[in-house]
Amino acid sequence: MALQRNDAPPDHQETAITASDPALSKGGTPSAGTATPAVELRGITKRFPGVVANHDIDITVRRGTVHALMGENGAGKSTLMKILYGMQRPDEGTIAVDGELVEFSTPGDAIARGIGMVHQHFMLADNLTVWENVVLGGEKLHGIGGKAKAKIREISDQYGLGVRPDALVEDLGVADRQRVEILKVLYRGARILILDEPTAVLVPQEVEALFANLRELKAEGVTVIFISHKLHEVLSVADAISVIRRGTTVGDADPKTVTARQLAEMMVGTELPSPESRASTVTEDEMLRVEGLRIAKADAEGIERVVLDDITLRIRKGEILGIAGVEGNGQAELVEAVMGMLPLDAGTVTLDGKDLTGTLTRARREAGIGYIPEDRHRHGLLLEAPLWENRILGHVTEAPNSKGPLLDAAGARRDTLRIVQEYDVRTPGIDVTAASLSGGNQQKLIIGREMSHRPKLLIAAHPTRGVDVGAQAQIWEQIRVAQREGLAVLLISADLDELIGLSDTIRVIYRGRLVADADPATVTAEDLGTAMTGAASGHIESEPEAVAEDRALAAEGTEAESAGADGLPGATDATTETAEDPQAGE
Amino acid sequence: MTSSHSADDGKPADGTSAEGAFADGPPSDGSSGAPGRGGAPAPAKPTAAKRFDGERIALGLAAPVLAVLLSLVICSILLLVSGKNPFDAFDVMLTYGTKSDGQVLTLNRATVYYLAAAAAACGFRMNLFNIGVEGQYRIAALFAAYVGGQMDLPAVIQIPLLLITAMLVGGLWASIAGLLKVYRGVSEVISTIMLNAIASAVVGLLLVPGIFAPEKGTTTNSIQTNPVSASSHFFSIETAGGTLWGFIVIAVIVGVLFQFTLNRTRFGFDLRATGRSETAATASGVNVKRMVLISMAVSGALAGLIGLPDLLQNSFYYGQSFQAGLGFTGIAVALLGRNSPIGMVFSALLFAFLDVSGTQLPLPQNGAFPFEIVQVMQGTIVICVVVAYELVRRYGLKRQQQKVGAELAALAASTAKKEVSA
């Protein structure tokens, strides 16, 4: 494979240059011209039905570097990488690998050009050994016997992966499995490695080990494309950064000079609610009380793992309680516990003085819990059902959806029309399937549905994830309005600025425990981030100067952004509306 | 006599259902599509909704019609290869289909198939694959036959008693799989297949002289239960073409109730929601475990009815020759009918027609065609339709997304200025 790397002949280089529109090369890294880049994406556009997942993306990845691709969930990173890996074909644009224009129709083509991908979810056979897994599907490369095993050892030593070929995969931990996946790709001759959110499943020490591996790979001349939305990780490992927002490249950054704050702004395009501009609506009446919650679950290996431990919190009427934490620290379980979807091992849940501990989800919904789920496709919608049936979902026992045991289709349809109008759900009608709406409009429908039943408590898990800017502001406003009327909100978000901007109180969850709390008025995103890694606990209060600086930066960003938005020509509105959530097209 | 007319009406509608649907489908689509296209590109909402609707119907019909046509082609090729003229064979079948005795037989057969399909569909609608309809109906029919042979109450009590017995036994037998799934996580596919085998064994165990069959002394060699009492005989209608089973009324009631429950009740909504997305249903408050138990039991209860038309209208006893395989046919009929109470009417009629008219093929005066061609036809229909439904489903979804995207883009373009300033 070294062959391929050094073999890019000059004429191919020329092809690449002529093919790439000079006007578009602004997206490339500054030093892109000095050597043939490993990967050059130019003007990549990918449309899914009703949605533009990628729009005019330009990225240049230099050889032998770790190049981070950043962006929020649903920004289009994964779609882009699927295009590069041959799983999807772009509608427009060109791909050049080692200066040579290529077209991939299957991942096999990409592998043949030395591109390998390590997926977020591992694809390993548990009951086979490491070397069997590596050889599986690549039998022709080095056979299936001792030669293959020797090759695996050689690769493992060369890149310092420390993989034992004879270990059974089911005995390996997550980090080891990931190394096996990397080895699998290298075994197939990859010189360009795509890692899709590799750190999402790892604990901090494992992340460090992975980064050490990546540096090793880089030293050996391998190019790594690293997808992530975690700022600090990217800053610590990447040599170059490209940021994608709403399906298009918004810019490149040099990790040596850029700050986490600036990166975050590039990623989310700061349009944050300003905390100073509102009076507190928090009352003294308690709405939700959760006490001593404990849940232990058996994980994939069958070992009991405590996912929630001794969680105690209360939310008052008119209060938004924000839960900060790195994903996978128990937020999802906390939501499911309050919703009654997970059995509790200990603890109580009380809503407005009513004990809900032993009740089922439906009873809790009827008691006044509204739910905006994290994954709207899995938990919030029936994708292949029409909108008006989706309006019934979750509230089938309540008016206007049913009368006694019978459905009231006419009532539900009328109310769906109202929601579509009031919440500005862009749709040609209420008989189209939920799948045909864009992510933002799906989310507006869900919020309209949940708010229509005047909930006492709203559980909002990542309410603006994968939603365009316009819808985002609308959603925040709707939550605010309901809050003024006494709604209690449990807000879970990975977006620290959203948490700080919306919440009245913030609690930090780490490994299933609430380890710290903070007042959003006196904390910076940075200090909150520190607490999320478990490095700080108790009450967190940042230096007043830091907070002021933080706010000023946020405000500046907002101004700049809104000024930019005003200057946009009208035609782009349609694009932003649909340019998110590629999953909507599936 | 009126019934003989209705039979006459029913039959051609079935025999030509494929062609009829085909003839209706595209034109209706065209006519509803044309005004939409002719009108303004972003007109009032109702037109758009109607267009989606017309298309949905056309798409819904496309798959089964294509599947039937494809299987006709495959069977034609097979017949040609074996040196027979396929059109002669189809002619024999169609001719028999226009005769009233063929029509009555078709309706009787379709009654049974419809009940079997309804039993399977009840589980399928919530992604519960009850493969055990076969065992459930056989064990239910055995118990019903035994009870019917032991008791001789007035018909008003006797017949409901037998219906309930059969449904109860079928439901309980199916509930074993439901309970195993809910409390032990056993896949219902595996457990119901196993329960089929167990059901056969249980039937064999019970159907011995001294238990469910009378002590030796009967004239026949085969072992069977006592005939059911005369009061157990279900009413039937004499027509020009033979005896039409009154059980068709039960099948109609089952269909109507199924349709009503599915589309008009909260329970039906929960059931459909679970079938479409179990995770979303759970989050919405559906008690999925309870739904699994209920729909498995209901599926089994309906399965219990399958054996009754034959038991109460035809053979009057349960013996070793009691018809087997209906459960599996029911699954095929449900698949073809897309688990829809209305769709299954057509698929049950089609399968019944193929079976009944197929019996005419081997007769020497008809040209001695192989009867197996009917089974090939049924098999290919099912395989084709499964593929076709999935293709049509994906196509429909994609097409709708594109349309919605296009309409919204048009809408956004026309109101772009307003939105930007807002």
Image: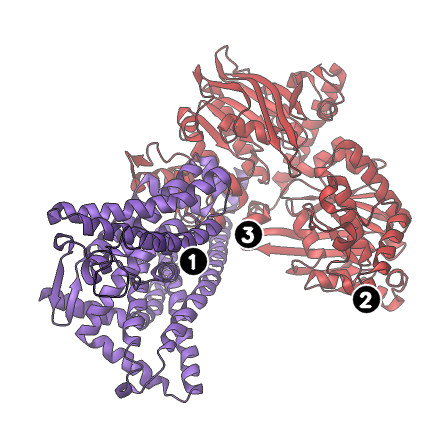
What residue would you read off at disc 1?
A: B41
Q: Nearer the viewer, mark 1 or mark 3?
A: 3
Q: Position of residue A495 (x, y in %)?
A: 65, 31
Measured along the vertical axis of the image, is residue A230 above or below residue A547? below
Name, please, the residue furthest toward the top.
A284
Q: What is the secondary structure assignment of the residue under circle 2?
A: helix
Q: Residue at x 89, y 53 (%)?
A: A154
Q: Is residue A570 left or right of residue B156?
A: right
Residue denoted by label 3: A585
> Where is residue B303 drawn, in percent x and y?
32, 52
Q: Residues within 10 Å of mark 3 (few under 14, many from 20)?
A: many
The residue type indicated by label 3 comes to Gly
- Of the chain colours in the picture, the one used for chain B is purple
Q: Earlier in the sequence, mark 2 or mark 3?
A: 2
To the question of a shared chain for discs 1 and 2, the answer is: no
Which amino acid type is marked by label 1?
Answer: Pro
In the picture provided, is B135 more to the left or to the right than A295? left
Separation of marks 1 and 3 at Cα, in angstroms: 23 Å
Horizontal side of B365 relative to A476 (left or right) equals: left
Chain A, hue in figure: red
**Residue A361 in the image, given as x and y percentages of width and height:** 45, 30
- Tell me which chain the residue with mark 2 is part of: A
Q: Residues within 10 Å of mark 2 (few under 14, many from 20)?
A: some
* Local crowd size for mark 1, using a 10 Å CA cut-off: few (<14), some (14–19), many (≥20): few
Which residue lies under the disc numbered 2?
A15
Residue at position x 71%, y 34% in the image: A264
Q: Locate residue A25, reporting x and y percent.
A: 78, 54
As displayed, is residue B11 above or below residue A496? below
* Colour scheme: by chain
Q: Nearer the viewer, residue A88 or B114?
A: B114
Q: In the image, which is nearer the foreground, mark 2 or mark 3? A: 3
